[in-house]
Image (cartoon, coloured by chain):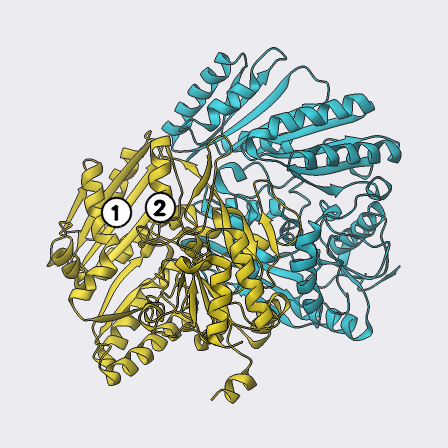
Chain colours: A cyan, B yellow
Amino acid sequence: MRRQKPDKGEKDAVKLRAAEEILKEFGVEATHLESPSSEQEVQSILAKAYKERLSVLPLGGGTCLGVAVLPEKVHIALDMRRMNSISELDPRNLNMMVEAGKTIQSINQELAQLERGFMLPLDPPRSSEATLGGSYAANMSGPLRHLYGVLRDQVLGVRGVNVEGKQVGFGGITVKNVSGYDLTKFLIGSAGSLCVITRVALRILPVPEASGVCRLMFPLDSDLEGFLLELRQSVLLPSAVVGRWSAGEAVKVLTVALEGHPKAVQRQAREIQAMAASHGGSGETLEGRERLLENLRLAVDPQWDMPRTLALKVSVPIAQGLGAARAMEDLAVRGSLRVDLALLAGNGVIFVYATDESDQLLAEFSKGVRETVLRTGGQVVPVSGPRESLKEWGPRIDPVVGKNVVMPIKRSWDPLGVLLPVGL
Amino acid sequence: MNRSQLVKEVISIVGKGNVLQDKASLAVYEYDASLFQGRPDVVAFPMDTQQVAQLVRLANREKVPFLARGAGTNLSGGTAPTRGGIIIDLCRMRRILEVDTKNQTALVEPGVYNLTLQNTLAPLGYYYAPDPASQKVSTLGGNVGENSGGPHCLKYGVTSNHVLGAEVVLPNGEVVWLGGPAETTGPDLMGLFVGSEGTLGIATKILVRIMRQPEHVVTILGIFQSLEEAGQTVSDIIGQGIIPATLEIMDNLVIRAVEASVKAGYPQDAEAVLIIELDGLADGMDEQALRIEEICKANNVVSVRRAKDNSERAELWAGRRGAFGAVARLRPSYLVCDGTVPRTKLPDALRAVKEVSKKYGLPIGNVFHAGDGNLHPLILFDGRNPEELEKVHKAGTEILEAVARLGGTISGEHGIGTEKLKEMRLIFSEEDLEMMRRIKQALDPEELCNPGKLVPPRMEQAAGQG
């Protein structure tokens, strides 16, 4: 691999090494590694690639690159992490514009330091490494989606560079905007196949007055399902409800995040503890924002060395979430794999983390998960994992939709196939 | 194929009782709630997805334009035809197919009125968040096409944030599901489809997210002697970290029209009324309401009133919801602009509206979603006066130019349709527009599906069209 612009100081050098590691982890060989620091640089790289028919792989923190359809070889890997600043910040209008290479955690750290304290309610797994652009391209959200919605609910506008190297922008900085096709939303989940994302405009919120978190334990003979249903149908407004356990573990741990007026947080904590007890669970309530954020990270992040961890994102109708998680647990136990499950219980999303020395076992497990989920009308996408374990994954997009909608658009936006293929 | 053959074919698909073809009936379909007009060749009322798909395939085979229509409350010319053809009126597909509280979804046909769904959900303790002022008559299919908003969007977002999936008849007649109860992978096609003004296909089933009704609601009415002070109150509320469910302002001209029409109890000499609504858990809400009242006082509010019960709350809202209809008492016609600016730019935008009003000698009322900076200047005029009509179009354009200069956008919730095509260039570059055109061309190469809407033609084509 030939490395461009290697001499950018220690900080960048670390990032460039990391990019190489990421590519290695996903089994992609890149001829050139570029680290643009501006939109103009991205434009020149894309314009050159288009002219010379070179393939381009945009790269962030590599936390969810498995969502993309990755070729074994690309001409240019585009490490976006030098574009890592908040370019516009307007707390009075509750919005900001952020460069694609900035990590989600660093965005929140900067917002928290503002006078009143603000936040971006977005917390995908591994948010200390996950970049905004990568999370946008892979459509990744975390536990806080329960109250605040998913990434698409936070995004107001997007800027990027098309395959011809031209700057394009959609949406804006206002919450309401129906001017033209909503390409700001359309590009979410496009996984580097339609254009290179350079900046994203987002809505921000004031940090809530009070925060707390209930940590609840549900033993084998408890009624976790009954608890989740009662909580879902109550008037309570938790900001996150995450179940986390290892396959085969008797006790399921549930983290319930609470934010808002201090009285509302206290009352919810009280009622949730009582509700848990009535379903055979028990637990404690911890106060404070740090505790809340720390517990949510623990609940949703993988705990193992990533290169050997297969991470899948499963999505099913809300009420089927727990059943689907249990089905995956059974698969793990039968296959003798170490598997952790993070169930976003109010949203029907499960992050599945499996690890084993054998790619074959991981591949069989992922196949089993896929069959189980598709049978129940759900969806599953690989987030990361050893290349061999994902080799036979197959199409990520429904073939009829792919043929009639996605492919015609891909052909019109990227006729030479400069960017990554779509998931068909 | 001539018109009579086309009508015959349409009848063979939907039956004679589901077709309109006489001149008087077609005249009704010439317009929507905008100033644009265009006559269709035939109107069909399909009863199911299959019939919609057959109509679209017929249109494709015969190269006839077609467009879907709901209640026709569209404010930008999106539901009146530009080149004749078939109007596919979905008002007879109006079943609520399923309400699933366990999964917090409802599956509906496109002809269901927004309010019908709300009324179905209310006894179950649930609601659907988008609440356009037209909710009594506007359909959910139309709401999807236009990505409708409403007063509660400040906290809960617009239609796009609440539609999970849809069965769609594509411009080529294929039937597909976009999105669904589980998150799909790949580009966000549902996000693309919502707000595409019926130019990328026709939704025949819509899966929406429903939410638990809030435990507690507090509605506050603030009366101000200055529009600026009402606006400053809005900024100060949000500046203190309070995000209400709604923040709505009406100016004196609209207040007087509303009082003459629905008698909502607004003082007629007030320069502005501000409706503030909080919702959520009861705990701490009274304290928040008191803080808001203090902010109002700091901005010289004349009086503050809290709705005591649901009927008083409904009364306050009746005035806001009836505002557009009420101004018809003042002049026979109005053009509603729909620009949105960053909230702190509202005073500048309102000043620009005042200047435009003065310049053209046209009365302009203001009723707007202040919390999200979404203006609705209502330019009042007499549509029978061609000179005045011309001035109205110029005034509308100048308001949108001001909005764009202030960093805003030309449509917050009413869409582009035919009315704001040329203003799209105020906020998008040719490259941006080209990406949009490529999407349209990729999915509708013959440009038959609601043609001539949403995205302006290329510069050279526009010049060619004169």
On residue B295, the disc is 1
Q: Is residue A224 left or right of residue B90?
A: right
CA distance for labels 1 and 2: 9 Å
Residue A323 x %, y %: 63, 25
In the displayed structure image, the side of residue B11 where residue B228 appears, left or right? left
On screen, B107 above or below A365? Answer: below
> Which of the 4 image quarters holds residue B33?
bottom left
Q: Residues within 10 Å of mark 2 (few under 14, many from 20)?
A: some
Residue A162 disc label: none
Q: Do badges 1 and 2 share one subunit?
A: yes
For the N terminus of chain A, give its image quadrant: bottom right
Q: Amino acid at mark 1?
A: Ile
Which type of secondary structure does the marked residue at label 2 adopt? loop
Q: Depth check: give the residue in front, B239 or B458.
A: B458
Q: Which chain is mark 2 on?
A: B
Q: Can residue B297 be seen?
A: no
**Mark 1 and 2 residues: CB-CB less than 8 Å, in contact?**
yes
- Residue drawn where x is 51% and y is 43% of the image: A149
Q: Quadrant of residue A418?
A: bottom right
- Secondary structure of the residue carrying tag 1 is helix
Amino acid under disc 2? Gln
Q: How many marks?
A: 2
B308 or A3, nearer to the observer: B308
* Chain label for disc 1: B
Which residue has dot 2 on it?
B240
Image side of residue A67 versus residue A156, left or right: right
The residue under the point 61% across, 67% down is: B439
Answer with mark 1 or mark 2, whichever residue precedes in sequence: 2
Vertical placement of residue B285 versus B301, above or below: above
Local packing at callout 1 (Cα closer than 10 Å; few below 14, some 14-19, many 20+) is some
Question: What residue do we see at 65% from left, 28% from top?
Answer: A324
